[in-house]
Image (spheres, rainbow, N blue to C red):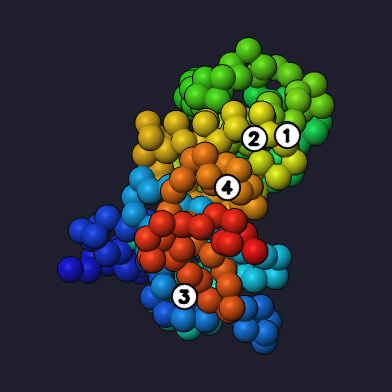
Amino acid sequence: MRIFVDDLIYRTMENNLIVDFRQVSIFQEETPVLSDVSLQIETGEFVYLIGKVGTGKTSLIKVIHGEIRPSKGYAEVAGYRLDTIKTKDISRLRRKMGVVFQDFQLLSDRSVYENLSFVLKATGWKDKAMIHTQIMSVLDKVELKRKAGKMPYQLSGGEQQRVTIARALLNNPQLIIADEPTGHLDAETSDDIMKILLEINRQEGPSILMATHNNHLMKKYPARTLKCEGGTLVDCNSDGEIDFDSMMN
């Protein structure tokens, strides 16, 4: 069954998929990056994405986020067909996603509260009371309500990453893309960030796709793992028990 809404094709979520790629090929300009990619992520699922630099992780994330279009195949995220999506509808797609960046990307001249308020206003929120309630709600989820008035430079790296997670939660996303979220953090802080992401996944229900090189966290918090390798995407769990050390090589 298909439903037509605003000239976009939405599939009924009978199969409960937030990401559905079938035989997708991805090019950067005229250079092939990934081919024959089949990827299904269910609503509420936590998935790792790994692979060496240059194997296509970033390109895959960019396709999911609507930054580049797939060259071939069927690609759908949160009900939006990525191969046919109109430019004006990409912002709607992105409101269904939250992104956690490795380097935080906070506005340095604005407080934590102002950083979050800026995002809400940019995505159409206008009621001041509702904006305030939503900001304090997401800060509570990352245990930073008391730091709302602080500037980014007054926060530790781990606290800045918590703000980034809070920002990703603002529009109640169906999918969170965490791109190396522990890359600049020490082991203890990385563990804290991982616990927050897993708790959000468990309680709030968004699917999470986490690109990482952190072998330690993957061993401690095992989950389905996908690897960009040899010009395509491999499901490392398909053959049973995972050898983490060999996966990272």
Query: For the view shown, which residue lies furthest in the bottom direction?
Result: 30
The mark nearer the N terminus, 4 or 2, is 4
Residue 190 image label: 2
Q: Which residue is mark 4?
A: 178
Which residue is depicted at the point 55% across and 36% down? Answer: 194
**What distance separates the C-alpha of mark 3 from that of mark 2?**
30 Å
Q: Which residue is mark 3?
A: 37
Q: Amino acid at mark 1?
A: Asp
The mark nearer the N terminus, 3 or 2, is 3
**What distance separates the C-alpha of mark 3 from that of mark 4?**
20 Å
**What distance separates the C-alpha of mark 4 from that of mark 2?**
13 Å
Which residue is depicted at the point 24% across and 60% down? Answer: 15
**SS category of the residue bearing label 3:** strand
**What distance separates the C-alpha of mark 1 from that of mark 4?**
17 Å
Expressed as whole percent of the image width and height from the top left, the position of residue 72 reads 48, 83
Q: Amino acid at mark 2?
A: Ser
* Mark whose residue sits in front, 3 or 2: 2
**SS category of the residue bearing label 1:** loop
Report which quarter residue 66 is drawn in. bottom right
Comparing 227 with 131, the one in front is 227
* Mark whose residue sits in front, 3 or 1: 1
Q: Are marks 4 and 2 in contact (CB under 8 Å)?
A: no
Q: Which residue is mark 1?
A: 186
Which residue is depicted at the point 27% across and 55% down? Answer: 16
Q: Amino acid at mark 4?
A: Ala
The mark nearer the N terminus, 3 or 4, is 3
Q: Amino acid at mark 3?
A: Val
**SS category of the residue bearing label 2:** helix
